[in-house]
Image (spheres, grey):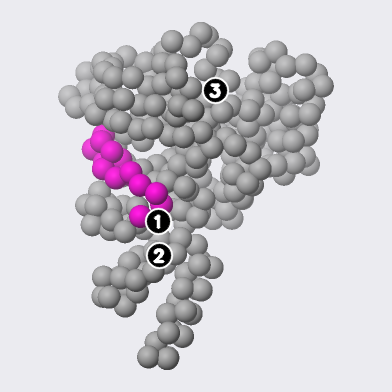
């Protein structure tokens, strides 16, 4: 089976920009993979997101080289209305995506545009509101709920259309830590229960790293690092050169590895870090 996302020799330069926003990008993403994309501001992350959902070149002027394919078809070859069924995007500002006066109408809007039957809409609405814990908010205006709830509405509206690829462009950048965790709790459940391909562009790594099967570092418009998550964070020098710093637990164990104190896998979650540290202490006691 071919990859769901294929990007080959892709470069994009905005009109009147001196340098390409993305340059010589080659990525292949298998269906069902959870991918984290990180990098400093200006590294090309949002341009990559807009390249996947067809906003580039559809809504922006610029010079494109190479190809960006979803399910084997170039994004600008899809007919109007087809690509949103394949790729759904959640942006950092959820209000920019709202079109309806109630949460329920917001969730139903995209499904109606797909021409789904009333029975299918009801079934998907029940599923997505249970997944995102939005049932108590269905009659509320989306503009009057909290920031975290707004982001879950934006996420649910995309999920309800069941795209094969979901792209989240810094979905928690405007949220407090509690709301941020709730959004990632939804993504964790989505990963367990579905086969969506999920691409999350994010600055906050504590919640992203435990879910990601693979991490990609963008720097100066290029792919600076692309690896399975555990191996990715062994490349501390490359990350630091790009101004990206891993979560504290990962940095701690990387420091132990550099000193020859620890030789195991770098733990990616707090529980794994605690277990690894306890094991290390116990081994030292018996030496």
Of mark 3 and mark 1, the one earlier in the sequence is 3
Disc 2 secondary structure class: loop
Q: Which of marks 3 and 2 is in front?
A: 2
* Residue 89 horizontal/vertical position (percent): 51, 29
Q: Is residue 201 shown above or below 236?
A: above
Q: Is residue 42 shown above or below 1?
A: below
Q: Are marks 3 and 1 in contact (CB under 8 Å)?
A: no
Determine if the magenta segment contains residue 28. no
Tell me which corner region of the image, top left, top right, bottom left or bottom right, holds residue 246.
bottom left
Disc 3 secondary structure class: helix
Tell me which corner region of the image, top left, top right, bottom left or bottom right, holds residue 38.
top left
Q: Mark 3 points at which residue?
A: 86
Q: Do the residues labelled 1 and 2 touch (CB within 8 Å)?
A: yes
Q: Name the residue under label 2.
A: 265
* Residue 140 horizontal/vertical position (percent): 74, 34
- Which segment is the magenta one? 217-231
* Residue 202 horizontal/vertical position (percent): 43, 44
Disc 1 secondary structure class: helix
Q: Is residue 263 shown above or below 222?
A: below
Q: Which residue is drawn at 70% across and 13% down?
A: 115
Query: What is the spatial separation of the Cα atoms under label 3 and label 2, in whole angstroms?
Result: 36 Å
Q: Name the residue under label 1.
A: 230
Query: What is the spatial separation of the Cα atoms under label 3 and label 1, in whole angstroms?
Result: 29 Å
């Amino acid at each position: 089976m071919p990859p769901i996302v294929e990007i080959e020799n892709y470069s994009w330069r905005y009109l009147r920009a001196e340098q390409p926003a993305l340059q010589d990008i080659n990525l292949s993403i298998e269906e069902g993979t959870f991918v984290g994309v990180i990098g400093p501001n200006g590294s090309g992350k949002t341009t990559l997101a807009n390249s996947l959902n067809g906003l580039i070149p559809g809504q922006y002027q610029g010079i494109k080289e190479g190809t960006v394919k979803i399910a084997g078809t170039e994004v600008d070859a899809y007919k109007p209305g087809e690509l949103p069924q394949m790729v759904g995007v959640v942006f950092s500002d959820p209000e920019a995506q709202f079109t309806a006066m109630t949460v329920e109408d917001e969730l139903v809007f995209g499904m109606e545009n797909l021409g789904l039957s009333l029975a299918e809409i009801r079934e998907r609405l029940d599923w997505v509101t249970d997944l995102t814990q939005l049932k108590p908010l269905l009659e509320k205006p989306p503009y009057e709920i909290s920031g975290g709830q707004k982001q879950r509405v934006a996420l649910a509206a995309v999920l309800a259309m069941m795209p094969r690829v979901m792209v989240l462009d810094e979905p928690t950048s405007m949220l407090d830590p509690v709301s941020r965790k709730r959004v990632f709790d939804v993504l964790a459940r989505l990963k367990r229960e579905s086969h969506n391909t999920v691409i999350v562009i994010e600055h906050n790594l504590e919640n992203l790293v435990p879910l990601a099967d693979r991490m990609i570092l963008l720097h100066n418009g290029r792919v600076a690092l692309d690896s399975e998550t555990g191996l990715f964070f062994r490349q501390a020098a490359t990350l630091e050169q790009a101004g990206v710093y891993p979560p504290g637990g990962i940095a701690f164990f990387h420091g132990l590895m550099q000193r020859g104190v620890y030789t195991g896998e770098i733990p990616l979650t707090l529980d794994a870090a605690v277990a690894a540290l306890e094991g290390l202490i116990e081994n030292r006691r018996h030496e």
